[in-house]
Amino acid sequence: MNAEKEDERHILLKKIFPSEKLLEIGKQLGDSYCLRFDERGYDKEYKRFDEGEVINRLSKLLSDQQTLEFSSKYRDSLSTYWDFRGNYYTYDPKKRELKLENSWPELRREMERLLEKHGENARAFLRACYRICVELDKKWKNYYHIQSKAREFGMKKGWFTMLADFELGGIVTRHKGDIEVPEERVPLLRSLIEQRSS
């Protein structure tokens, strides 16, 4: 199986399925680890299942078709908050609908448009987001860290407009003092930064 697709499926499962449903799916697939736990998620020694272990196993076990079938079967339990715009999967939280669809061409066009609009400031902003959110793994209260790093990378002005544009374009998300590059979009951002650097 394509390792990139497996990695993306791992992120998808973690993001849109509740952990109890993942355990249930694992049991239906006959996974030996999942079968050790009862319907409440405990084994005979009253140890709770490890969600990360279940996700690791399911990301390898599930086919695309099975992933779609389970998303349909458990539609009412899927996230209504997180969207997912990956290279292999696209999920709309408003409709609770998963598709085998590549969202990256649209995101790439939007990034290119914003880079054209904001020029060097946008490049500095994207590099700062990547440095803080991905390389340093600082996901909470990182607003001023990113702003400071973007200035260090050469951003001059237009922070608020640019941040709003990148948020509306689906490149980053923001909640209070947190700016996030959604995990499934990180490889796309990395490739764009590398392409612009070379």
Image: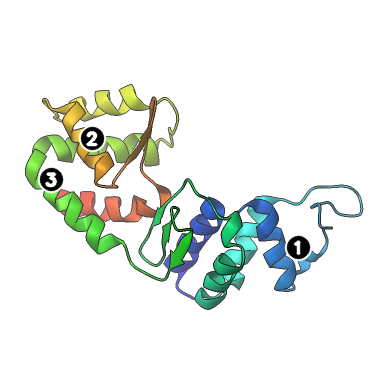
Asked if the residues shown at circle 2 and circle 3 are in contact, with their CB atoms under 8 angstroms apart, the answer is no
Q: Residues within 10 Å of mark 3 (few under 14, many from 20)?
A: some
Left or right: residue 185 versus residue 52 is left
* Residue at which label 1 appears: 34
Q: Quadrant of residue 34?
A: bottom right
Which of the marked residues, 1 or 2, is nearer the chain's N terminus?
1
The image position of residue 82, as x and y in percent, is 46, 48
Residue closest to the eye, 169 or 112: 169
Q: Disc 2 residue type?
A: Ala
Q: Disc 3 residue type?
A: Leu
Tell me the SS state at disc 2. helix
Q: CA distance from mark 3 to mark 1?
A: 46 Å
The reply to whether residue 198 is visible in this rendering is: no
The residue depicted at 54 percent of the width and 70 percent of the height is 67
Tell me the mark number nearer the camera, choosing from 2 and 3: 2
Q: CA distance from mark 2 to mark 3?
A: 14 Å
View extreme (right): residue:
44
* Residue at which label 3 appears: 115
Q: Residues within 10 Å of mark 1 (few under 14, many from 20)?
A: many
* Residue at which label 2 appears: 164
Asked if the residues shown at circle 1 and circle 2 are in contact, with their CB atoms under 8 angstroms apart, the answer is no
Tell me the mark number nearer the camera, choosing from 1 and 2: 2
The residue depicted at 19 percent of the width and 52 percent of the height is 110
Which of the marked residues, 3 or 1, is nearer the chain's N terminus?
1
Q: Disc 1 residue type?
A: Cys
Q: CA distance from mark 1 to mark 2?
A: 43 Å
The image position of residue 136, as x and y in percent, is 40, 35
